């Protein structure tokens, strides 16, 4: 059974591009908050703002690799891994396992939200199609979660039936956290400016244990690459590639 961490500060959360989880520099928070700002109570107006931003984000995302998303060089082994197989040095799965495991999971998830895909698609095609057609599914989930949090408040304890799980990244003098499960919820939280969330512990990632992290031990990340990723996440250093996304790909409100 996971350890309940109680309430933890959103200011310590990190997301894609090493950004702090917020509505200014984290792409998901930016997209959802801008759409909420224009929508009021209207889901359709929300979608009119969200869909173009999401499509632009996905266009940019398809052009990236795991290495470029993490700010690693072209000599990294991850420079040939597609962006949709995104993973971290301490992830349980290596790139080959991720590319096999993720697409069927995505297909099932999208089907549960009304976006059905053929069972006969290849894994690569599933991810390409999802990137091109998922705006509607994601947007409505973001909007409904945001309305629920606004109307009913945020969860006030750990939810065993639908847990919000996080990784704690711990250095000797600093720490941050990453969402393990509950990405739509944390995007709504960021967009609404919520300051604290209740979370369950998925695992503790300690800098001193870098050599034992799964994707370091198997050679996918060099130690210096793994520490670069860890340190950027703990410190919340926003990559230039993320700033480029915010400046050139996400539509203005």
Image (cartoon, helix red, strand yellow):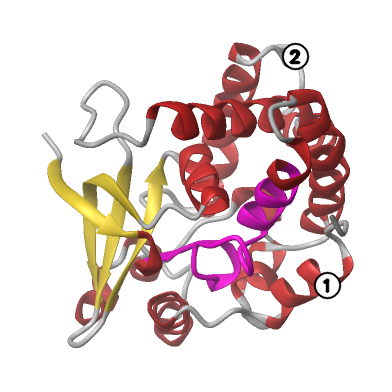
Residue at screen point 65% across, 68% down:
69
Residue identified by numbered label 1: 247
11 relative to 123 in the view: left or right: left
User: Helix, strand, or loop for circle 2?
Assistant: loop
Query: Dot 2: few (<14), some (14–19), or many (≥20) neighbours within 10 Å?
Result: few
121 relative to 251 in the view: left or right: left
Up/down of 116 relative to 143, above or below: above
Up/down of 26 relative to 127, above or below: below
Could you say which disc has been placed on residue 54 in the image? none
Residue 74 is situated, as x and y percent measured from the top left of the image, at 71, 80
Query: Dot 1: few (<14), some (14–19), or many (≥20) neighbours within 10 Å?
Result: few
Distance between the Cα atoms at labels 1 and 2? 38 Å
Residue 130 is situated, as x and y percent measured from the top left of the image, at 75, 32
Of 220 and 2, which appears nearest the observer?
A: 2
Residue identified by numbered label 2: 120
- Residue 125 visible, this orientation: no
């Amino acid at each position: 059974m996971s350890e309940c961490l109680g309430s933890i500060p959103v200011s310590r959360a990190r997301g894609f591009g090493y950004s702090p989880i917020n509505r200014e520099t984290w792409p998901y928070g930016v997209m959802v908050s801008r759409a909420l700002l224009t929508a009021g109570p209207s889901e359709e107006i929300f979608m009119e703002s969200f869909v173009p931003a999401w499509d632009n984000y996905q266009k940019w995302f398809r052009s990236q690799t795991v290495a470029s998303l993490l700010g690693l060089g072209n000599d990294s082994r991850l420079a040939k891994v597609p962006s949709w197989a995104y993973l971290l040095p301490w992830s349980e799965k290596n790139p080959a396992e991720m590319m096999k495991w993720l697409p069927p999971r995505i297909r099932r998830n999208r089907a549960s939200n009304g976006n059905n895909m053929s069972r006969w698609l290849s894994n690569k095609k599933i991810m390409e199609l999802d990137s091109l057609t998922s705006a509607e599914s994601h947007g409505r989930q973001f909007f409904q979660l945001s309305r629920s949090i606004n109307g009913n408040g945020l969860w006030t304890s750990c939810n065993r039936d639908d847990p919000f799980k996080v990784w704690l990244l711990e250095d000797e003098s600093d720490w941050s956290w990453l969402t393990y499960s509950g990405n739509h919820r944390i995007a709504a939280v960021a967009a609404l400016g919520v300051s604290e969330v209740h979370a369950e512990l998925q695992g503790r990632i300690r800098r001193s244990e870098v050599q034992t992290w799964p994707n370091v031990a198997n050679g996918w990340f060099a130690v210096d690459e793994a520490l670069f990723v860890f340190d950027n996440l703990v410190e919340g250093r926003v990559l230039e590639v993320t700033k480029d996304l915010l400046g050139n790909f996400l539509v203005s409100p």
